[in-house]
Amino acid sequence: MSQSFSARVLRWYRKHGRHDLPWQQPRTLYRVWLAEIMLQQTQVKTVIPYYQNFTRVFPSLKKLASASQDDVLAHWAGLGYYSRARNLHRAAQLIREVHKGRFPRDYESLLALPGIGPSTAAAILSQALDQRQVILDGNVKRVLARYHAIAGWPGSPAVEQQLWQFAEQHTPGRNNADYTQAIMDLGATLCRRSKPDCPGCPLSADCQALAQGRVSDYPAARPRKILPVKAARMLLLANTEGAILLEKRPPSGIWGGLWSLPELAMDEDIAGACEQRWGVQVQSSDDGLTLRHSFSHYHFDITPCEVRFKTRTLRVGDDAALHWYRPEQTKSLGLAAPVKRILDQYAR
């Protein structure tokens, strides 16, 4: 079954797979690594323009390692899951320091770098070096769960262990670079989450989910839970030139290391906070329309609030964690998507 499975997938890939993705030309360790990190939690069509821009700015590991975190985050802004960018930057620096600038070529060394898990490490070595490595990303989980009719949510340890065993069984001894891309392509383009193209699938003859007429039942959905809602105000504080005050967020947590508007709890006194933090007296403040930004584990309701002062001088000084923002500077700053939306609305 294993040889037949991989042979069919490879035959399909040669004719129908994706052979012109940016990271395939050429398939270097650095380029494949960037792509695999960007593709975590993000679809190929979304990643491609970001990848092309990122590799223009950071064409080599040396360039990425020597860049500032601000610059890296600025060119990541909009892709989300910003811990990926911070891990990418830190991993580049570790490769420079620990591996003397040479990208690791073995699984254990890759796995020790921040942001790289078992499937990502395997995908990098398989695609860049044609090593026999076993991958199990979301697309592969879906293909295997349907082909073997594996019940249960793939994120649960017991189900995931089963999937790893089948992934190992089906991975061929050669043509690994192509097989890795092929099995991912199969899940992304044919064995889709909704409206799968079963007639075009090379595995349809013995796919157990299809034989049962239950393709839509596999893989089982993640158990639903009600996400909590958090709320905060984001203050729009302008100086006499009309520039808006931004604060740099802590290095960890949501939007870690990005620039954001000053944030207050909804029940926090605006006038008191402004006087304490910036030495200004508030004349008036107006809340705008609340916007919701959803993370995987909670919803974040943001209320922009324009604040006007009796005096126009904010006590900012030379604080490196503060910045006066002007619209023309957006390309050099890492801004979270909802913060940029608020700033764009304010500018209009």
Image (cartoon, helix red, strand yellow):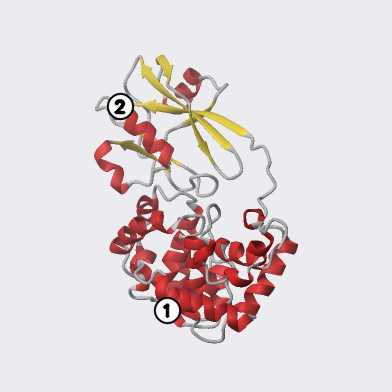
Q: Quadrant of the N terminus?
A: bottom right
Q: CA distance from mark 1 to mark 2?
A: 47 Å
Which residue is drawn at the image coordinates 39% and 66% (left, top)? 65
Q: Residue furthest right?
A: 158
Report the residue at 54% width, 49% height from top.
252
The residue identified by callout 2 is 239
Crowding near pointer 1: few (<14 within 10 Å), some, many (20+)? some
The percent coordinates of residue 266 (x first, y second) are 55, 24
Which of 61 and 211 lies nearest the eye of the viewer? 211
Disc 2 on helix, strand or loop? loop
Q: Which amino acid lies under the numbered mark 2 shown in the image of this protein?
A: Asn
Quarter location, residue 15: bottom left
> Which residue appears at 45% of the width and 21% of the height?
275
Q: Taking the image as drawn, is residue 113 in sight?
A: yes
Residue 44 in percent (x, y) is at 42, 59
| Image point (53%, 57%), residue name | 196
Q: Nearer the viewer, residue 242 or 13?
A: 13
Which residue in the structure is indicated by mark 1? Answer: 102
Residue 200, given in percent of the width and then of the height, sits at 49, 66
Q: Nearer the viewer, mark 1 or mark 2?
A: 1
| Dot 2 crowding, Cα within 10 Å, few <14, some 14–19, many 20+ | some
